[in-house]
Amino acid sequence: GGEKGRLAEAPEEFEPGGYSGGVTKSGRRERVPVPSLPQEIEEPVLIVEPPRGLLRLDWKELWQYGELLFFLTWRDLKVKYRQALLGVAWAVLVPFMQMVVFSFVFKKVANLSTSGLPGPVFYYVNLLPWTYFANSLSMSSGSLLSNTSFLTKVYFPRVIIPTVPCLASLIDFAIAFVLLGPLLWYFDTPVGAMTLFLPVLMAVAFIVALGTGFLFSALQVRYRDIRYLLPFITQIWMYGTVIFPFSALSEYGWLRYVYALNPMAGVVEGFRWCLFSETIRAAGYTADPPWFLLAIGAPVAWAILLTGLFYFKKMERTFADII
């Protein structure tokens, strides 16, 4: 009984890497080495801190996610024209068909002034920057809702999502701009020397598109009926930008300042001035530089951007919960 009692004794406690008391077949206790447990692997620690500052924008983080911005922009372009019957031709057809309608309704029927330019040239040049802005606003306003699964599963700077349509629409603008060459050749309309100023005007259009995209994308997450109101706002905004030249408001002093509050008005007027200032003067019309419009419109554009970004960052932490 005593031998069995010794065999039934519980083994001594041991530590990993030490020795344990074991019992052989002959009944003798021996010290058996115990294998060491694998050491824990140290993993890098990611410290998430709340953003600081009024706008709370981490530029270093945005730079690190630049590749994601490029990938999403390229994805949007491929998805937009995949399985489309006419493909990238839609980038040209949309402003072209609008040009045909505007030329007939406002030039032939209403006989509105086009500052000495052929109606199709006048309206197509006006529609180039406006179509870029309208497309950017339309796509960026619903970008958060169309990327719901992406937003709720992966961390990345959320400002990338409404920025992508504004960058992708620049490709559409470049394609539509190519049609301007044959149009000018057909109507025998020369181009002025200030064409190199066009990138500055497009930068203003990009700022306005980005600011409104931030604002309306955040609003549409909380208020889904914004999607029904936005086309109406865009349509009214277009008529106040594309149809009437700024020179037609010379008799209304106070209205000129109200008109200048529209930042896209300075962009559209600037496009015409850069391309056709000499042609407009040769036709006997005023072709003053759009400095007055840009002096008021450019600060308004920056105000729109900062306001939209501030509201977007304020609502950012609630996107995943609301969506």
Image: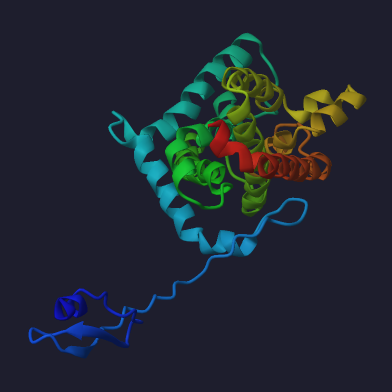
Q: Which residue, as the protein is rendered here, is positioned at the far right?
A: 253
Q: Position of residue 230 (x, y in %)?
A: 61, 22
Task: Reply above or below: 228 against 148.
Answer: above
Q: Position of residue 40 (x, y in %)?
A: 39, 75
Q: Nearer the viewer, residue 195 or 32?
A: 32
Q: Which residue, as the protein is rendered here, is positioned at the far front?
A: 1
Q: Residue at x 63, y 42 (%)?
A: 316
Q: Nearer the viewer, residue 230 or 317?
A: 317
Q: Residue at x 65, y 26 (%)?
A: 242
Q: Position of residue 150 (x, y in %)?
A: 44, 43
Location of residue 127 (image quadrant)? top right
* Quadrant position of the N terminus in the picture: bottom left
Q: Residue at x 20, y 76 (%)?
A: 5
Q: Nearer the viewer, residue 313 or 249?
A: 313
Would you say 118 lies left or right of 54 here? left
Task: Reply above or below: 244 against 294.
Answer: above
Location of residue 219 (image quadrant)? top right
Q: Residue at x 68, y 28 (%)?
A: 116
